[in-house]
Image (cartoon, helix red, strand yellow):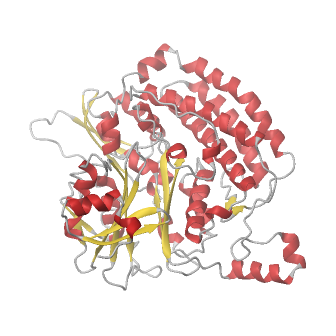
Amino acid sequence: MNLTSELESNPVIKKLEESHLSGLEKAEEHHGQLCLTLSADSLPACAKLFRDDPELNFNFLSDVTCVDRFPHEPRFEIVYRLRSIPKGDELQIVVRIPGAAARVESLVPLWPAANAFEREVHDLFGVDFQGHPNPARILLPEDWEGHPLRKDYPLEGYR
Amino acid sequence: MALTLEKIPGQEEKLILNMGPQHPSTHGVLRLVLELDGETITRATYDIGYLHTGIEKTCESLTYSQVITLTDRVDYLAPLSNNLCYCLAVEKLLGLDAAIPPRAQYLRVLLTELTRLNSHLVWLGTHAIDMGAMSVLLYCFREREEILKIFEFVSGQRMMTSYFRIGGLAVEPPLGWEKRVEKFIRIFPAKLDEYEALLTRNPIWLKRTQGVGIFSSEDCLAWAVSGPILRASGIAWDLRKARPYSGYEKFDFEIPTRTEGDVYARYQVRMAEMRESLKIVRQALEGMPEGPVKADAPKIVLPDREKMKTQMEALIYHFKIITEGFHPPVGEAYQAIESPRGELGFYVVSDGSPKPFRVHMRTPSFANLQVLPKMIEGSLLSDAVACIGSIDIVLGEIDR
């Protein structure tokens, strides 16, 4: 993968290369914030590295959300936001998954905070988080049909 | 109403108790299911979504400027914090963040700090009444009314202000607003002393709060707890200092922290925060720069009424912005601010059209609430009420 020299010297990317974890698909900066696109199967190992490495120390999973790119495939972008407290670094991780197999490994074993965030994504987008201890709907009633934040969810008319 | 706790075989004598959603001490429509052994909570779980109105979905069918009115309704106790966070995120997306005039930045800081006082006053009053201290609520709402009057004077609205706009403020505040703010910050420190005289060394208050709902700093980090709860467990983390926005780096204030991590420590942190906010308001008032309150970006910011009525070009821009909106570049932006409850973040994704492709709100109450079962399991039923109050949840931003 071709990276600009500025990104190559970024400690997060250096650590990823040193640890020989494959799966980095894209690295870019959005408004001064590092954003890594990882493959779905490499996510748990990479996330563990980011959390446990003493220099990176991303100890705070601040958010998990999703963007539906329908009708483009891979359709779902799961967006993880990590913080390192009190150092102050921020890191965005994106995992792209296809609509036909909308599932990704749960990060609850690494950060218990992922529990409610992943349930919300599951509820509103219909993405399955494998290994989640309580994969139930969180905001909508449990007999609700469909996932409203999907782009192909009907906005009006009878159900 | 399907969520419940199944009885564990052999422990049938334990009582499953449903608390809420219509329960005054759940601060809205939070529902808890508790398993009780006598008066001790042995297991707990929570049920949310009673106030889910699909705000994130609604955002996708409104233009960028129209979304501002929805952000007020997310956290109805801190509307201006939400306005600010959303506007900053869209400004980042537009590359407009460096173009915000200093007067607009100072006014934004001043008003968001008044919002923090407003929110903390409601928290203090309701937290105290939950524990039986009735009079504090009346005093807190008396002072809150003064803040709401300032909001009404400045923006025309007491609660759903929608006063911050993409690129600055809606209008220059009316003449004489400084006097009102000045009067408020002159009288408020004495009122804070009054609340503290009622509570800080009150033996009943101490018994109800000290050593209750202890949450360690390691747990806070693992569970993504931010705001006063995190600071009460000993970590001096405040986004206004760690990643300053809207010119907060120019202001001199402290981050109050405690190490006990209990309900009383959270009370102390919030009380100290109110004094710090007052300091920021005073500095903003004294250093208030002159100049415009809107950025010079005619394609994004609405022109003044006068210009719109006299200049053809301004009229065309006005028409375009109102009927169609503006087109931000394709991309995404995330902006986090320190709301009264913790890290509030807006994640805005643009596909180049005048309506956002996706708006996600990372709301502090949603993250903070999930630690409640862990906090109250093993404690007394009456402590659950103290813990809910100390987390300071707003169901509007939990359910969105």
On-image quarter of the N terminus of chain B? bottom left
Which residue is the extreme one toward the bottom? A71
Asked if residue A90 shows in the view, the reply is yes
What is the tally of numbered marks visible in this picture?
A: 0
Rendered residue at 48%/20% (across/down)? B205
User: Residue B353: where, in percent of width, then height?
Assistant: 55, 81
**Where on the picture, by quarter, is residue B310?**
bottom right
Rendered residue at 76%/78% (across/down)? B318
Choose between B176 and B128: the one closer to the eye. Answer: B176
Q: Is residue A8 above or below residue B156?
A: below
User: Residue B298: where, in percent of width, then height?
Assistant: 74, 75
User: Residue A124: where, in percent of width, then height?
Assistant: 36, 67
**Where on the picture, by quarter, is residue B274?**
top right
Q: Is residue A152 above or below residue B233?
A: below
Asked if residue B18 shows in the view, the reply is no
Left or right of residue A105, residue B261 in this image: right
Which residue is the extreme one toward the left? B10
Q: Is residue A32 above or below residue B242?
A: below
Rendered residue at 61%/46% (across/down)? B248
**Where on the picture, by quarter, is residue B39?**
top left
Which residue is the extreme one toward the front? A5
